[in-house]
Image (cartoon, coloured by chain):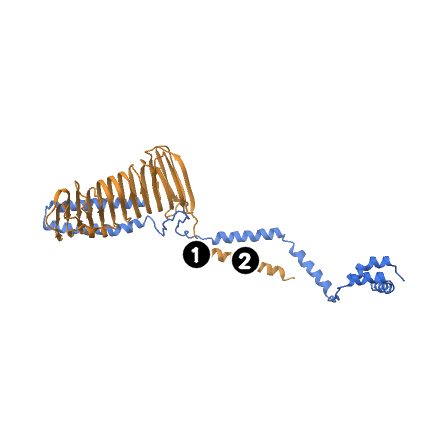
Chain colours: A blue, B orange
Amino acid sequence: MTIDCQVVARDLDAYRDGTLHAARCEELEAHAAQCDACLMQLERVTAGMLPVFAPTPPSTLRDDVLRAVAVRRRSRRLPRLARTAGALAAAALLFVMLRPTTAPPAPTVADSTIVAVPVSGASSASADEIARSEFRALDDAARELQAELTRTPGDAELTALLRRIDDQRASLRRQVQDARS
Amino acid sequence: MRRAFPSRLAALALVLLGAATAVRAQATQPAPMQPVPAHLRGRHVSPTVSMRIYVPAGRLIIRTWDRDSIAVTGTHDAASSMFGGGDLGHVKFGVEPLRTGDTRLASADLHVTVPRRARLWLKATVAMIDVTGSAGELEVYAVGGSITVRQASGVISIESIDAPVQVDSVRGDLRVRGGKAPVVVRDATGTASITTVSGSVTLTGRVPESRVETIGGDVTLDATQLAGVTTEVQTHAGAIRIAASAKARPLLELSSRTGRVTTPAPAGAAANGRVLARSFRGTISVTPPQPLNSKAH
């Protein structure tokens, strides 16, 4: 069977791609051997072509493909959306369960234009602790004055001093109470 | 291919485990809290508006202007929120914990501008309070931190347990009730009543007609500008140091029950002012003015 130049032109792409039937390939090459124009076209399209490695498919390919399709079908029983939602829900649940339950750190104010005073762990309860030493100082002073007063009973100056210490104690107590409130 | 699905589950479990670990790590490590801006501009008020400002922790800066309005700028921490309200004559605001039952101090850094004659009531627990230029009534309460009042006039009342108090260039009636922190008054005119327990008291520059009482706190008095002024100082155990120049020495009446009194002769003249200093067992000394200035702060 001989082919003409139009058939060669039509089959050139298939020839180049290696999808042309072997018998047609022989016919095409025989025609090109006698036709310079077709030979030139054939050489042009095959220029730079590399030999193609055609691996032999394994004998188990068909079974493997069918098995993979079956597994994919089973996995599709749980829709992708549901799986994603489930994962998100689980993550949210974990976040809620494991989020910090302890009090957040002491506030620190910082600003680019106003530099704040950092405060750490201060609380109204500390007013009692701060005032404790002052109450102690007042008590010590009062004891000292009372001891002196027993030695010099009726001393007006000592009595006035004691009264002032009482005033200061009352004032300090009020300040601590105000701080608590 | 059959193992792909279980491996995806394992990957998901690993991701969740990682997220949980990250959250737990976040729980154990304190995360920095971002400050939240606080703004209030141009709120119209009376020139003598009565203001109550409450900032438990942080910083409160008060400035005055000749306008009938207030402005608040600054930040508060993310765990706090601003509260407040009022009308032309009364304004109250401050910061409080965002969550009910939160025992931590609400913290803010506020810069408040008020009418010059506004009546101010400021309360803090542990904050730096700085007031400049007020001409109305001023009341400041703080446990700790610091209190500074400058160029103010009128009735100024300061109460603090552990906040150092510094008063500079004021006139009017000054009342300070301190605890263990030092009180420094510089260039004050009018009258002053200062009481501490163990905190020291220093009066420098112009000294007002004043009465100073401490239990254990030392008192340092610059008596170089006392003309026409009487200053009474009384301590239980605190030392009293009086700086007086030889030329303008005030009339000194000094007595300590068991402490030592060191006074140069002559005692001075009433025209230069009068100092009555008494102590139960503290020492009393009169020195030239130079060493006093170095001990002023």
Badge 2 sits on which subunit? B
* Residue B140 appears in the figure: yes
| Amino acid residing under circle 2 | Val
**Residue at image location 80% in from the left, 63% down from the top:** A43
**Quadrant of the image occupied by residue B171:** top left
Considering only vertical position in the picture, is A12 above or below B161?
Answer: below
Q: Quadrant of residue A55 in the image?
A: bottom right
Parent chain of label 1: B
Q: Is residue B17 left or right of residue B160?
A: right
Above-or-below relation of B289 to B112 = below
Residue A33 image offset from top left, x and y in percent: 86, 65
Lower position in the chain sequence, tag 1 or tag 2: 2
Q: Residues within 10 Å of mark 2 (few under 14, many from 20)?
A: some
Foreground residue, A106 or B47?
B47
The one of A85 and A140 positioned closer to us in this rendering = A140
* Same subunit: marks 1 and 2: yes
> Can you tell which mark lies on residue B246?
none
Of B176 and A61, nearer the camera is B176
Identity of the residue furthest to the front in this view? B247
Give the residue type that dot 1 points to.
Thr
Question: To which residue does mark 1 refer?
Answer: B28
| Residue carrying label 2 | B15
Residue A19 in percent (x, y) is at 79, 61
Q: Tag count in the figure?
A: 2
Q: Is residue B28 above or below residue B137?
A: below
Mark 1 residue element? helix
Q: Quadrant of the N terminus of chain B?
A: bottom right
Q: Position of residue A75 (x, y in %)?
A: 64, 56
Q: Secondary structure at mark 2?
A: helix
